[in-house]
Image: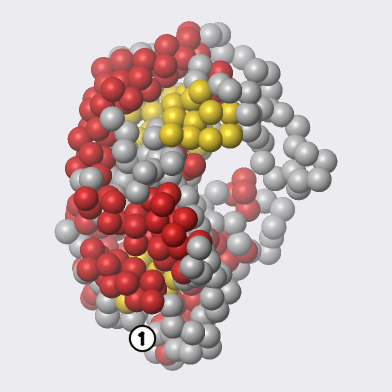
Amino acid sequence: MSATAAPSSPHVMNTYGRLPIALSHGQGCRVWDTEGRAYLDGLGGIAVNTLGHNHPELVPALQDQISKLIHSSNYYHVTGQEKLAAKLTELSGMTNAFFCSTGLEANEAALKLARKFGHDKGIERPEIVVYEAAFHGRSIATLSATGNPKIQKGFEPLVEGFIRVPLNDVEALKKATEGNPNVVAVMFETIQGEGGIHPMRWEYLRQVRQLCDERDWLMMIDEVQCGMGRTGKWFAHQWAGITPDVMPLAKGLGSGVPVGAVVAGPRAANIFGPGNHGTTFGGNPLAMRAGIETIRIMEEQKLLENAANVGAHLKAALERELGGVAGVKEVRGQGLMLGIELDRPCGVILNRACEAGLLLSVTADSVIRLVPPLILSIAEADEIVAILAPIVKAFLAEPQP
């Protein structure tokens, strides 16, 4: 395998720095490329393949749905939407849901909800608090809410109406919004994914919840990457014992079938009316079946407990192997959403791990990210460590340029 990224097809827009492999098929937590080489999947399609690959219950359910109805317009009732919405509101303690196809769309809908919430209160120029190092998507509005100047560059002018604050600092939040009557919402990820696996502290989440209640702001928690059981609870904010007003979801909700959702609580439940928002593909019968079956299988196979237990084992093993190594700053995260921060850019590890038969990602330049399927076993977690630890140690032992 080449040590450099493969060139893109001349017919495919050059938007990704791809590794020089093409995946062919998978089984459980393993995938194979078109050359027949096997890989342990520590990335899960970037926290998407909740049930791994070729799950023996999910695949027949999707085949059954495809034989009946793949898509129907939202001009009509879609019974799967009612069923999945009921389940998501039961799991979250919230009240209703809107379905779309991606996390970007879910976050875009949340931003629209917040603005409409403000306008309904007579605020002409609503403002939303967002966070340093946040990632909410790549549309112009979600890009503007994102806290990464590198991916914003070249797409200015950005959308106005955002106030940016640091993580886990309630005094900074209060200072940034002091005397500003235009603030309508606070939006953040419980654990930042693309930003480098940075968690919000539980106490901070409770402080923000209190502030939102006192000031009549919407608390909007982006659970696109850290939600759907990844941390050992259905939604990562539940570790803090709070409930948001708006919760965008996607990624793991459909185990690979594109599904996004915005779940709303009482304060946000009736902001949108007919004509305020919509989607062609969102909430289609196939996507809804994927979400319904994913949750059913997660419950029956106790995958939240598995994510918590195997994740704790994996984190402890990584800390044991790498914790004292010069150049390793921290192993952090929760459940099966873990990051290993190094003291230098480490993008080369992406390719080296791939060559050794392990799929993962590097985010925020220097953080190795592991977000494997939630079916990962203890033995597979140990295998991840056995492959990854020597690669990291060898990389850190190299002279720095």
Between 321 and 69, the one lying in front of the other is 69
The residue lying at 69 percent from left, 57 percent from top is 155
- Image vertical order of residue 201 relative to residue 330, above or below: below
Q: Residue at x 58, y 23 (%)?
A: 36
The answer to whether residue 226 shows anywhere in this view is no
Q: Which image quadrant is residue 305 in?
A: top left
Task: Indicate left or right for 390 with 75 as reference.
Answer: left
In this view, 187 is above or below 214: above
Q: Position of residue 201 (x, y in %)?
A: 25, 48
Query: What is the x, y in percent for residue 299?
Result: 22, 52
Q: Does the rendering let one see residue 5?
A: yes
* Image x and y of residue 248, in percent: 40, 64
Image spot of residue 89 (x, y percent): 27, 70
Q: In the displayed structure, would residue 305 be above or below residue 109?
A: above
Q: Is residue 395 above or below residue 206?
A: above
- Whether residue 174 sits left or right of residue 48 in the image: it is left
Residue linked to disc 1: 270
Residue type at mark 1: give it: Asn
User: What secondary structure is marked by label 1?
Assistant: loop
Q: Nearer the viewer, residue 276 or 194?
A: 276
Pick the residue in front: 311 or 171.
311
Q: How many numbered markers are drawn?
A: 1
Kindly indicate the quadrant of the structure image that contains residue 374. top left
Q: Which image quadrant: the C terminus?
A: top right
**Residue occupying the far right of the picture:** 10
Could you say which is closer to the camera, residue 234 or residue 240?
Answer: 234
Q: Which residue shows up at 76% across the image and 46% down it?
A: 12
Is 366 left or right of 336, judged from the image as shown?
Answer: right
Tell me the quarter of the image containing the N terminus. Answer: top right
